[in-house]
Image: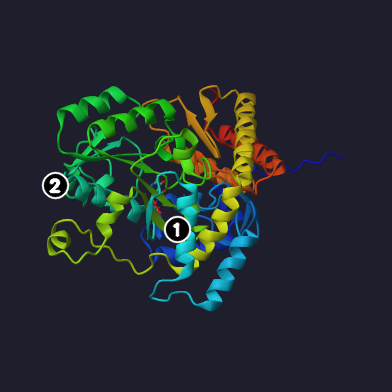
Amino acid sequence: MADLTVAPPAPSLLEAYQAVFPTSRALYERALALFPNGVTHDGRFLRPFPIYVDRASGSRKWDVDGHPLIDYWMGHGALLLGHSRTEVVQAVASQAARGTHYGACHELEIEWAEWVTRLVPCAERVRFVSSGTEATLMALRLARTFTGKQKVIKFRGHYHGWHDNLMDGTGPAKDRPLPGVLREVFDTLISLPPGDANLVEDRLKRDEEIACLIVEPTGELFGGTPLGGEFLTALRWLTERHGVVFIMDEVVTGFRCAPGGAQAHYGIKPDLCTLAKILAGGLPGGAVAGRKDILDLLEIRPDAAWQTTKKMPHYGTFNASPLSAAAGVAALKVVAAGQDIARANEMAALLRDRLARVLDAHGLHTWRVFGQFSGVKLSSSQNPAQSRRGDLDLIYALRGGMLLNGVDLPGVDGLTSSAHTADDVEQTAAAFDATLTMLMHEGILART
Ligand SMILES: Cc1ncc(COP(=O)(O)O)c(C=O)c1O
């Protein structure tokens, strides 16, 4: 006899997501009563709710409902070596048993800084802080003190942390400070379009008040608009010629592009660089490293005139925390050998290739996959008026679909680690394929 039952319609992406991640949903409801939007970082916000993670190891993390997820967040870039790398875990566990904070100097901070000076070309001196945001704040203050000037050149879209000094403007012409950012501070910021050395030169010639220039050396958000060695060489030359402090923000690129960061990869030495993420092996930590004569402005000297006109005061409860130092030393020892960087790069290249093939198979010809080193990025020219991260509904749907298919891809940007395998890449390509099918079926994404 014929089966006359009608198959129920396949659940929508939203219905499937809610059914698959019920414990995350319950936790999110608790979090909503505590945190704005229920989250502790803007980038972790996701509709209808973010997933909650229970544990992580290697290239994977497991959500609170027990699903294994191939991870391309990699601790916002801190985990080049993957989650819970044995050397790092052992170093942290052994240090935790010996004390987490001495309120004093300790040998590990010296060892940590020795690794930084050994690996990073510009690092004649080092000062540890607790995050990348703090590092760029310090680099700017040092540059202003050193030159006696106030203004800063940055490149539009480059991210250097969330303090007042380096946030791009808002509004159609990007000429208004973000809410809460002081107008006086915003007026010291010159945001130029990236990649045009003539514009930089013109600015430096016209304005005598520029203290420093800061750049993400591989372009915004680790290569969103790739730069390259030629542009960086021009920046080095121009800043030197005009007496402007050249700061490379190596918070992401440091220990990732090469053991000595982008500056080692491109062979260009900045005056200062800012470091964080991989520096501290997955624990909180940051640093400013660079020219001795600039970092010496942190010195306490008996000379009263020095103390009042030059000395940059600097405190910070968790500077060079023993736990971060232990994790950092363990991670940098591994990074120094170079194989882990090469492995992460190899997996990213493979992933870029596989994702591009999937896009092609779906006829999504306005989409492209790109990226350098261990970065993987997606973009679409379907709506050029929107930025790469502009279409949030699509990004949330893409993230949700990938999660349903066992992959945690942070929207249109991902990072590989040395723990990723070719098998992970194949599974990710299959998840991408299934997700695109779902998005096209629901009309969220159209063939182009
Ligand atoms: C290039 C760059 N600089 C600075 C920061 C700020 O670092 P943190 O989040 O540790 O404050 C980030 C963070 O992603 C970054 O990507």
Q: In the image, what residue type sits under mark 1? A: Ala
CA–CA distance between discs 1 and 2? 35 Å
Residue at the spot 44% in from the left edge and 35% down from the top edge:
218
Residue beneath the point at 50% across and 55% down: 115
Q: Nearer the viewer, residue 11 or 117?
A: 117
Classify residue 87 by image quadrant: bottom right
Q: Secondary structure at mark 2?
A: helix
Residue at point 13%, 64% (across, down)? 304
Figure quadrant of the N terminus: top right
Q: Could you say where residue 402 lies in the image, as x and y percent from the top left? A: 59, 44
Q: Secondary structure at mark 1?
A: helix
Is 287 rendered above or below residue 352?
Answer: below
Write down the residue under mark 1.
113
Name which residue lies at 32% across and 51% down: 292
Q: Is residue 182 left or right of residue 251?
A: left
Q: Position of residue 138 (x, y in %)?
A: 29, 54
Front residue (pair 442, 174) = 174
Asked if disc 1 is less than 8 Å from ligand 1, the answer is: no
Residue 228 visible from this viewpoint: no
Tell me: residue 22, above or below residue 59: below
**Colour mapping used in the image:** rainbow
Q: Nearer the viewer, mark 1 or mark 2?
A: 1
> Which sits earlier in the primary sequence, circle 1 or circle 2?
1
Instruction: Please state which amino acid type lies under the numbered disc 2.
Output: Glu
Up the image or down, 281 lies above or below 167; here it is below
Q: Dot 1: few (<14), some (14–19), or many (≥20) neighbours within 10 Å?
A: many
| The residue positioned farthest toward the right in the image shown | 1
Instruction: From the image, tell me which residue sits under label 2.
Output: 184
Residue placed most toward the observer, 389 or 369:
369
Callouts 1 and 2 close, C-beta under 8 Å = no
